[in-house]
Amino acid sequence: MEVREAIAERRSIRRFKETPVSEEAIRSVLHAATLAPSGKNRQPWRFVVVQGAEQRAVMVARMREGIAKLEAQGMGTGSAKWTVEIMAHAPVTVFVFSAYETYAGKLNTLADDLMDIVDVQSIGAAIQNMALAALPLGLGTLWICDVFYALEELCAWLTEEHVMVAAVALGVPDEAPTPRPRKPVDEVTRWVGP
Ligand SMILES: Cc1cc2nc3c(=O)[nH]c(=O)nc-3n(C[C@H](O)[C@H](O)[C@H](O)COP(=O)(O)O)c2cc1C
C-alpha cells in the first residue's frame, strides 16, 4: 500500500470485530511507531498494551470510575462516555506515555518545558505511524485522548509514573466510515513570499 493511499484511506474506527489481533501484528504496528522521527532522537514514546477480556474489563471500569468522579464534581466529560464504549469493544488498547516527564516531578525549567513540547510532537508522529502501519494489516485504529478523563484511575491501575499522552484502540474494523470533512489547504495556509 502506498503511503499516500494509506494517508487518504485511514479513518478513525469506532466499531471493531471481536477477532483477536496477533502479537505479530501488534509488534509490527509498534515497530512502525518506533520508526517515527523524534526531537534529538530521544524516542520518548513508551507503550503499554492492554488486551484480553479480563484486562479490558478492568480498563473500562477504571475509565468509568474517572468519568463518574468528574461528573459528581459537576464537570463536563465531553465524548468520554461514548469513547469508553468503543474501548470496551476494541480487542487491543495501546496506552502511550512520554518517558521523560513524570507526574511526580513536574518539569520546571524553560528548556525542560520546551523538550516536553518536542517530545509530545515526536509521540504524535509515532501514533500516526501506528495508524498508517495498521491499514495494510487489515487493522483499524482510534486515537484516543478521552483517557484524560480518567487519568488518575488509569495511571494507578497501570502503575505508570510517566505522563500519559494518548491511547490507541486497535482491531479489525467492523465499519467503513466515510471521510470526515477537511478544511481546504487554502483555508489553513498563508503564503509568505512569491
Ligand atoms: C489527538 C487526538 C485525540 C482524539 N481523541 C479521540 C477520542 O478520545 N475519542 C474519539 O472517539 N475520537 C478521538 N479522536 C479522533 C478524531 O475525532 C478524528 O480523528 C477526527 O474526527 C477526524 O476523523 P478521521 O480520523 O476519521 O479522519 C482523536 C484524534 C486525535 C488526533
Image (cartoon, rainbow, N blue to C red):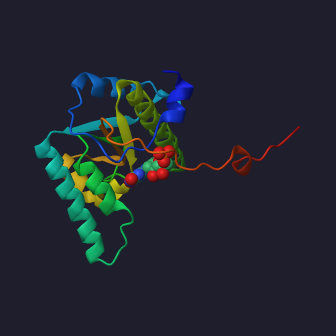
Q: Is residue 54 shown above or below 154?
A: above
* Placement of the C terminus among the 4 image quadrants: top right
Q: Would residue 128 be seen by someone viewing this image from the given angle?
A: yes
Q: Is residue 177 shown above or below 76?
A: above
Q: Residue at (48%, 27%) from the top-left corner?
A: 41
Closer to us: 141 or 70? 141
Residue 117 on image: x %, y %? 51, 46
| In the displayed structure image, the side of residue 5 where residue 104 appears, left or right | left
Closer to us: 143 or 4? 4
Q: Residue at (86%, 40%) from the top-left corner?
A: 193
Q: Residue at (42%, 37%) from the top-left corner?
A: 127
| In the displayed structure image, the side of residue 37 where residue 94 appears, left or right | left
Q: Would residue 116 be seen by someone viewing this image from the given angle?
A: no
Residue 161 on image: x %, y %? 27, 47
Residue 130 on image: x %, y %? 40, 32
Give the farthest residue toward the right: 194
Residue 21 on image: x %, y %? 24, 30
Q: Is residue 63 shown above or below 75?
A: above
Q: Residue at (51%, 41%) from the top-left corner?
A: 121
What is the number of callouts on the image?
Answer: 0
Quarter of the image holding residue 168?
top left
Give the farthest residue toward the left: 54
Closer to us: 124 or 172? 172
